[in-house]
Amino acid sequence: MEREQQGFTLVELLLVIVILAIVAVTAAPRFVDLGSEARTAKILQLEADLRAAAELASLQAMMPGMVLRDPSSGTLWLDMNRNGIIDSGGGIDQDNPRNNIGIDIKLIANSDGVLGPDNFEVAKLVNAGDDIIMEVGERHQAYLGFDRNGDGSVKDDNCRVYYSQPIGTRGAFVGSMTDGC
């Protein structure tokens, strides 16, 4: 007597599982881009941190004794450690803001006298992490973000935070672009 076949063999089941795994591995990344969500979240958090830090620096600059003037250049500095001495770290590196290691923050005053951090001092305001590139822009800007196209610059990528020091009649400005994350 012949028996009816009632199910799949183990080999058939394993073959289907392997095919489904291959499809999942190749197709899933196209539908789920968690890296983009993570980069967007990091940029938005960095924007909030930078906005809060710039506002705090502006408020501290209004406190008595917090602003020091360099007698030789007239440059204003925010005395972050309140020791009465300008701790600039030996100068300002406009090519790599991470090299501005002094604790005090160089200030810029706009035409209304509103003080804010200079654009190449922004790195001192936030802890961005090693995966974030910091780039000094034109005269007043700084950019912090991800280099999505691999050209070494974040200014041309839309996955960044933008900072502008006080100019004209406004204070510091912070904004972000995340449509390229």
Image (tube, grey):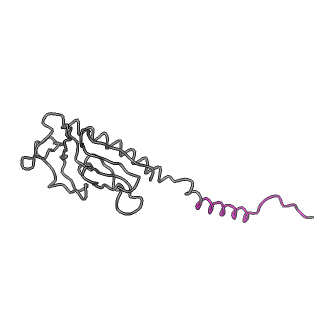
Residue reaching furthest to the left: 71
In the image, is 15 to the left or to the right of 123? right
Q: Nearer the viewer, residue 41 or 160?
A: 160
In the image, is 9 to the left or to the right of 49? right
Report the magenta stretch's main SS.
helix
152 w.r.t. 76: above or below: below
Q: Nearer the viewer, residue 167 or 92?
A: 167
Q: Nearer the viewer, residue 96 or 87?
A: 96
Residue reaching furthest to the right: 1
Task: State the image quarter where residue 152 is shown.
Answer: bottom left
In the image, is 21 to the left or to the right of 175? right
Residue 82 in percent (x, y) is at 14, 40
Residue 130 in percent (x, y) is at 33, 56
Residue 95 in percent (x, y) is at 24, 59
The stretch drawn in magenta includes residue 10: yes
152 w.r.t. 105: above or below: below
Task: State the image quarter where residue 1 is shown.
Answer: bottom right
Task: State the image quarter where residue 28 is shown.
Answer: bottom right
Residue 154 in percent (x, y) is at 36, 56
The residue sitting at 22% across, 47% down in the picture is: 118
Instruction: Write down the region rendered in magenta.
Output: 2-26
The stretch drawn in magenta includes residue 11: yes
